[in-house]
Image: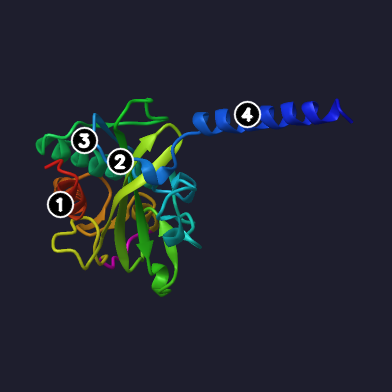
């Protein structure tokens, strides 16, 4: 028994030491991440399909039950991505005009200090007259298109929400995101068209580009108070 007590004490010290080491090595909790001035803001492609909405997105609940467009074709899919690119590119341009270091990005963001990501999603609501029917991306026959966006501070695998934007018909200048027009199209035209707030389109027209510019401005307008609160602007 005289030998057991020192051994137990040694084991206890070892466990305490391991616990202390583990605590020191553990990353800081998410809530401890400060919103320092960004060294980089990585703007991602806006989602036009359910699989492109990150599982950890704070907007994930908004997309519960949302599906892909069952009538999507290759031409429509390509057009949706062109429009999404136009919005993300405009977002970068307008953030840069505010003096912020924004860039377009795909893939894992670099492990830089004080870096942020901006994600976004297109959500068509009220498809085929069903109020609760939701499609991620664009469609024909929808009631309204909304554009959601989220800005996060990132540190390794940790993310902390800076702010959100939700642009739709209730926004002052929503651009692409508003009540959708109703159009009767032939099968061939429908296969290459999507509905936006600036009309049913088959290409990225000047109206679409202006709509993308207005939508990006509306997103920034909603994020602006958070950026000002942190002293970025």
Circle 4 residue: 18
Looking at the rendered image, the disc whose residue lies closer to the viewer, 3 or 1, is 3
Q: Is residue 185 magenta?
A: yes
Magenta residues span: 181-186
Q: Is residue 63 magenta?
A: no
Marks 3 and 1, Cα distance to the nearest angstrom?
Answer: 25 Å
Q: Quadrant of the C terminus?
A: top left
Looking at the rendered image, the disc whose residue lies closer to the viewer, 3 or 4, is 4
Say whether residue 45 is left or right of residue 177: right
Circle 2 residue: 34
For label 1, the SS is helix
Q: Position of residue 197 (x, y in %)?
A: 22, 59
Circle 3 residue: 37
Q: Position of residue 108 (x, y in %)?
A: 42, 30
Label located before the other in sequence (3 or 4) = 4
Q: Position of residue 49 (x, y in %)?
A: 44, 49
Q: Position of residue 7 (x, y in %)?
A: 79, 26
Looking at the rendered image, the disc whose residue lies closer to the viewer, 1 or 2, is 2
Marks 4 and 2, Cα distance to the nearest angstrom?
Answer: 29 Å
Q: Classify mark 3: residues with Cα within 10 Å, few (<14), some (14-19) or many (20+).
A: some
For label 4, the SS is helix
Q: Classify mark 4: residues with Cα within 10 Å, few (<14), some (14-19) or many (20+).
A: few
Label located before the other in sequence (1 or 2) = 2
Q: Quadrant of residue 103?
A: top left
Q: Classify mark 1: residues with Cα within 10 Å, few (<14), some (14-19) or many (20+).
A: many
Disc 1 + disc 2, Cβ < 8 Å: no
């Amino acid at each position: 028994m005289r030998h057991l007590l020192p051994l137990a004490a040694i084991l206890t010290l070892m466990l305490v030491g391991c616990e202390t080491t583990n605590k020191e090595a553990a990353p800081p909790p998410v809530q401890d991440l400060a919103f320092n001035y960004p060294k980089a803001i990585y703007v991602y492609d806006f989602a036009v399909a359910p699989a492109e909405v990150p599982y950890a997105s704070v907007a994930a609940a908004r997309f519960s039950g949302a599906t892909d467009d069952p009538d999507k074709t290759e031409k429509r899919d390509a057009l949706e991505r062109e429009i999404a690119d136009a919005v993300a590119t405009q977002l970068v341009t307008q953030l840069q005009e505010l003096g912020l270091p924004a860039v377009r990005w795909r893939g894992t963001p670099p492990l830089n200090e004080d870096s942020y990501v901006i994600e976004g999603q297109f959500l068509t609501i009220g498809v085929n007259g069903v109020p609760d029917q939701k499609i991620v991306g664009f469609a024909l026959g929808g009631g309204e298109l909304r554009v959601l966006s989220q800005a996060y501070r990132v540190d390794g695998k940790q993310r902390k929400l800076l702010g959100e934007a939700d642009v739709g018909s209730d926004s002052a200048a929503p651009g692409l995101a508003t009540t959708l027009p109703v159009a009767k199209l032939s099968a061939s035209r429908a296969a290459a068209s999507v509905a936006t707030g600036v009309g049913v389109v088959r290409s990225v027209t000047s109206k679409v580009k202006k709509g993308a510019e207005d939508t990006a401005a509306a997103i920034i307008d909603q994020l602006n108070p958070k950026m000002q609160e942190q002293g970025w602007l």
